[in-house]
Image (tube, rainbow, N blue to C red):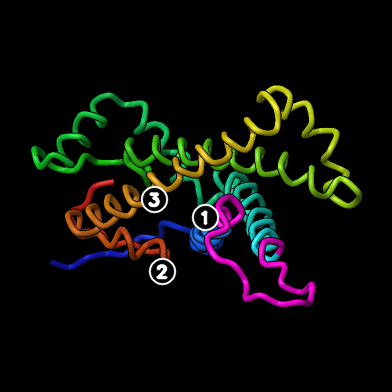
Amino acid sequence: MKRNMEFEFSAGLRWTHWLRAIAMVVLTVTGFYITYGFITPEASDEPILFLNAKFRMWHEIFGFLLIAITIYKTYLFFFDKTSAKERVSLRDCLSPTIWIKQIKYYLFMGEHPHLRGVYNPLQFAAYVGLYMMIFVLCVTGLILYVHCYQGGGIGLFLYDYMRPLEAMMGGLAMVREIHHIFMWGILIFLPIHMYLAMFNSIMGKEGAMDAIISGYKFLKNDHKH
């Protein structure tokens, strides 16, 4: 059957999607090391083996990258013309009928519902939850950051803004605990996201996973808009 191609994701959205994925992997590995120190450098008499400092440096670099990506993707969602289809997904998410049809589809009990936006209701709700977790991770990460770099630069600039948030969360130890808990939330989300992305791509046969690489997905000729 002949298929048409439809542009779905802008270059900015696609690039930031994969950069965010890389950032999450690096932040997870370096975050585990900062917490548990699962490897040690080779012994030396010279004070040059600051492995913890190196892992912390990369954690901070990719942490600020994640913050920048989150701000940029939030801007795209609300203001980018190409991302209008993402905003339309909110209407699908508010429809109980589409929710029921989507759940039946995942349970092999019905056809995929017609969507006006890019994401089905479960996807949209999951992405909202993802952004909430990332927001908490970014804020708690900045609170932890300013305690190491309050002597100057952005750490000094943010110090007075982060301290009230730290107090509201119950102190620095609780901030660190919240940071870890929400990291596990991300780790639970990722395999579910990958499984459902592959599920939709295979079952829907519309190149759903191709779209996040090329920007285009396939549509059957009889697909109605």
C-alpha separation, residue under disc 2 versus residue under disc 3:
21 Å
Amino acid tagged 2: Ser
> Mark 1 or mark 3, which has the lower sequence index?
1
Q: Is residue 192 left or right of residue 143?
A: left
Amino acid tagged 3: Leu
Q: Residue furthest right?
A: 152
- Magenta-drawn stretch contains 170: no
Q: Residue furthest left?
A: 109
Mark 2: few/some/many CA within 10 Å (<14, 14-19, 20+) = some
Q: Which residues are magenta?
A: 31-53
**Picture residue at 24% right of the left edge, 41% below the top:** 114
SS type, badge 3? helix
SS type, badge 2? helix
Q: Is residue 149 left or right of residue 24?
A: right
Q: Residue 56: x and y, percent?
A: 68, 58
**Picture residue at 62% right of the left edge, 38% below the top:** 176
> Mark 2 or mark 1, which has the lower sequence index?
1
Residue tagged 3: 190
C-alpha separation, residue under disc 1 versus residue under disc 3:
12 Å
- Magenta-drawn stretch contains 50: yes
Q: Residue 121: x and y, percent?
A: 33, 35
